Each structure stands twice: as C-alpha cells, then as structure tokens.
Amino acid sequence: MSYTVAIVGRPNVGKSTFFNRLLEERKAIVDDISGVTRDRQYGVTDWNGKTFNVIDTGGFVPHTDDVFEREIRKQVKIAIDEANCIVFMVDVVTGITDLDDTMADLLRRTTKPVYLVVNKVDNGTRQLEATEFYSLGFENTYFISSITGTGTGEVLDAITDGMKEEDSDDTLRENALPKFAIIGQPNAGKSSLLNALIGQERTIVSDIAGTTRDTIHTHYNMFQKEFMLIDTAGIRKKNKEKEDLEFYSIIRAIKAMDEADVCLLLIDAGKGVTAQDVSIFSLATRKGKGIVVLVNKWDLVEKETNTARDYEKALKAKLAPFTDVPVIFISVTEKTRIFKAIEFALEVYENRNRKIPTSQLNEIMLKAVEAYHAPVVRGNTVKIKYVTQLPTAVPSFAFFTNYPDDIKSAYKNYLENQLRTKFRLTGVPIRIFFRKK
C-alpha cells in the first residue's frame, strides 16, 4: 500500500500553507477566510529518497449546525482512517483552544503515529510560548513556521524514518496509474458520479452549485480495475465569479485536466449541450486529452424509439469537427451505465497510449494515400513517401512529403479519419504534421 500522511487541525492554523510547502507548489487554496479548504486534497512529495502522499484536510470543527462544517468533520475522520500517520497542526499565536483539545482527544485514541506540529513559531518569544503545547501529551512535538519553512525538515525526517522502502515504491507505482478527470459545468453531477463509483461519500455533495472548490484525487481499485479519479470544481463562464476563490477553482479544474489522461465530460441531459460544454470540450481537445462524453440525468428525459440516437447526433454536430468520441447515456442517481463509462475511459486511455510500429503504419497509410491522392497544387503533384509516429503523449504523426505547405485541411482530415478507422483511436485527439522529406 502507498504511504499517506494526513494534515489535520482546526481552521486557520496554516495546514494548507504547510501542505503547499511540502509540495512546493500552490495546490491548496490559501485564504484568510476560515474553512476555505472544504475537501481533502492530495499531493505527492518526497524526502530523504522516500515518496509519500500528503492529504490536506478542511479545518476540524466538532459540533456545529453549518452543513459544510459538518461535512468537513466527516472528511477529517475519513482522512485519519486513510492515513498511515497524522500531522496535528496547532497555532502558537492563538494558543491551545477548546477545538485543539477536542481534536487531541480524538487523536489520542488512534494507534497511528501522531506528530504535533506547532505552527507560526518564528521568533524567540513564540518559541517559549509554544512550550505550553507539551501539555497536550504528544511524544512527537515540533515547532515550525510554515511560511518560512523553519523546522519543517525535522518533521519530515521523523515521518520518513517511520516509513519502509516498499511503502515508497508502492506510492510511486500508484502515481503511475491512469488518471481520469471528471469535468463539466457546476451541478452536472460530478461529485455524485465519483461517490457512486466508489460507493462512499468521498466528496461533499450538496445542491449548492460550486460545492467542490478544490480538485480531489481518489484511488479506485475494484473489479480488477485500478486508476485515479480526479473530481474538479465546476467550470463556469468567467463573468459570474466575483470571488477570487471561484477564479482559483476554475484554474484548478484546468490544472486537473493537465494532470489527467482522460477527461470524462459530464453533460446535463435536460439542459443539452451548452456553449460552455463545447468550450470545455475543445479545451480538453487542445490539451490532447482522451475524452468520453457522459450524458447524465438520462432517467429524467422522456424517451421515444430513437431518442438516444437523435440526441447523440445533435450532440456530435455541436462538438464537430472532433466527433470520434464515445457518448454514454448515464444516470448517476440510479447508477445506470456508470461502470460502462469507466470501461470506455480505460479503452480511451489505451488508445491514447497506443504506439503503432512504423512498418505497419506505412503499409496501411501509404495504401490509403494511393487510394486517394492529395490534390495537385499549382501543377505540382504532392507525394507522401513515409509516415512515422512521434514520441509524444498525444498520438502525433509526421507525414513526409515534397510539398508540406500545400496540403489542404480537407486532405488532412481524410488522413486523420483513415488513422482513426485503421488503428482504433476513438476518443483521442490526433495531431498530424507534414514535413519536408
């Protein structure tokens, strides 16, 4: 199993700053509003040659009527269950609060190693004040400053000392798994899909649009299938967001696309394909990601004989020119065809990673060129002599020709369609380049 460290504590003690420092990137949303991190966030880091996962949790609030805070509490408990060790973060400026006591109480009951980390200790006075935290009774207590990084090395040394080599290897292996991002507009049912697939309340689901502000990584390992699922904040048009946070969420969703191999684009069947869906789709295409389109809430649509067929035709007309994508009609609430969606995603993942031997590529594609020649340009006969696949993440092909600049897009589309039909590249954008031979 991979090794996981969870960072827990009450709101605003600096958990996300510490998390970002470990990952050396701005992954968690950091803001002065308490409770900005609503869900768990995942990252991978290494120290002393050992690799491990880090989870940043929402601030722990024990008893409250606020729906989000109630959910945060549930999330923290799940993170503690999942982790191999726990970093319990407190803050020297505020001192020990009732919330810290409640949390300490909860953590004393776990058999897992707990590292008490006192944050914001950045001068001698605070160093003295921090000693009061020894009264919480945790053997491993460290004084750090997340912002400057002082003391974080000692915490990491302690964490990695408790790790085995094989834990590190497993973590690396897990991070090499296929990654599927669930993308789409707010309220299309992304988080509900994630929860339905893994059968537990992994993300906070509510009817308020924009509940998921961060991306959430989930390891899926069931029915002989293993991959990472990334749930993203809904992407909406720019003019609506007044809050910075909303802006960050959109950047985060785009970043999740960058991390993913395949994007599952969720569309609300009732609303049909909107301009926003088309722009999300073309963004994923431009980024060279595999795509599977899932039409959710299909159970609510009134059906006649060819409803699905006509719907798919209209949908593909809007997504043109790239229409070679699987379209699956699902219902998350009734769990209809959601596992079929995963099978398609795995298939698209295979397609995206397919490497075609040069000999086979030439044998088949040069026949296609013979069957339909490129049009003559300014009296010149365009000849294609050789094809090769380029070593890139996105299937890309170079056609060597005497007049690379004279090949029109219609002929390029013909070659693309031939590649698709002959080599099973469904769901994957293809790049074609013409080079001087």
Image: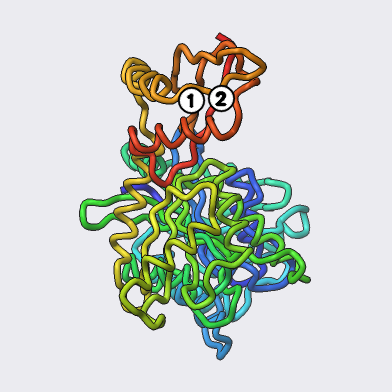
Residue 132 lies left or right of residue 395; in this view the side is: right
Q: Residue at x 54, y 67 (%)?
A: 273
- Give the mark nearest the N terminus, 2 or 1: 1
Q: Is residue 66 visible?
A: yes
Is disc 2 placed on a helix, strand or loop? strand
Amino acid type at image mark 2: Phe
Residue 81 occupies which quadrant of the picture?
A: bottom left
Q: Is residue 87 visible?
A: no
Q: Residue at x 39, y 73 (%)?
A: 201
Query: Relative to the observer, which residue lies in front, 393 or 123?
Result: 393
Residue underneath mark 2: 433
Q: Is residue 294 above or below residue 423?
A: below
* Residue 430, image x, y percentages: 49, 36
* Residue 35, image x, y percentages: 63, 73
Residue count near mark 1 (Cα–Cα under 10 Å), binned few <14, some 14–19, many ≥20: many
Q: Residue at x 44, y 25 (%)?
A: 372
Amino acid type at image mark 1: Phe
Residue underneath mark 1: 397
* Residue 196, image x, y percentages: 35, 71
